[in-house]
Image (tube, grey):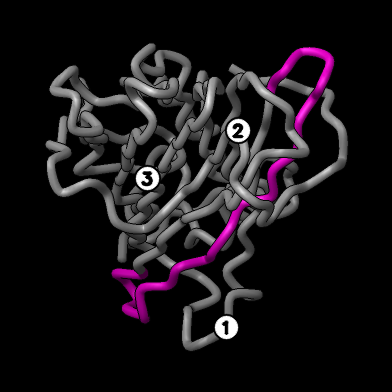
Amino acid sequence: MNGPKCYSSLGIRLLPIVALAVLFVVAASASAAPVPWTTPSGSNARFAWSDGQSDDGGLGEGGLWGDPVITVEGFFFDDINPLFRAEAPDADNIVSAMSVNLSTLGADPIPADALTELHITEWGTYTGIWEEVAASSGTVLLIPISPSGPPTNLGQLTMTHDPDTLSWIAYMDIYFDQIGGGFPSAVNILGLDVTNHLIATGTSTIQKTGAKVIVPEPTTVILVLCGLIPIVSRRRR
């Protein structure tokens, strides 16, 4: 569930489209149908979630992201649909989005503080020459629900690759107090939307094979576990 570990540090933002393109965009294909996760709502000791779903990329084959394994650390997408693959010329444009609402209100057994950061990582494989790839990776949309704030598109993930294994990884470390533009530095209820757009041209292919969204441990939980503050009863907000 941890994904690939060793990659080159080369990040590509925009290059001429020659063999392969990996584009992550905000809006999913109009023909894509939402597919709820097997467990679209639930809670654990750290956070609660609701309305978890992905879409079928217009292929009618279920959610391309697959059902995540959900732990107190976050969401682990290890069961990515094999069709989350663009292969020229037959399937050169695949779009799929994942969305979920996160909440720290009333998470048991230890009262949880608001969300202040998220960490997103995706990975997969490709064929073709990376230097001839147009790679514009990103798009993460955050919607602060409580406290309310402006929906914010955070732009592009950082993308790197390993030419020896023909694999790629994209990641984004999100710290709410660094977003700006009126986005709250701490959020109790948050909407998260991640949209992928895979394009293959020429004789190339691109495939997504895994992803994870890490929900860091709230400060209150860390302090309690370290014995720095006593466990006291707190009225749920």
Mark 1 and mark 3 lie on one chain; the one further toward the N terminus is: 3
Q: Position of residue 24 (x, y in %)?
A: 47, 48
Q: CA distance from mark 1 to mark 3?
A: 27 Å
Which residues are drawn in magenta?
144-167
Q: Tag 1: residue type? A: Gly
Q: Residue at x 50, y 22 (%)?
A: 207
Secondary structure of the residue carrying tag 2 is: loop
Secondary structure of the residue carrying tag 3 is: loop
The reply to whether callout 1 and callout 2 are in contact (CB within 8 Å) is: no
> Is 2 within the magenta?
no
Q: Position of residue 91 (x, y in %)?
A: 34, 24
Residue placed under numbered mark 3 in the picture:
107
The reply to whether callout 1 and callout 3 are in contact (CB within 8 Å) is: no
Mark 3 and mark 2 lie on one chain; the one further toward the N terminus is: 2
Q: Tag 2: residue type? A: Ala
Residue placed under numbered mark 1 in the picture:
180
Q: Position of residue 191 (x, y in %)?
A: 32, 58
Mark 1 is surrounded, within 10 Å at the Cα level, by few (under 14), some (14 to 19) or many (20 or more) other residues, namely few
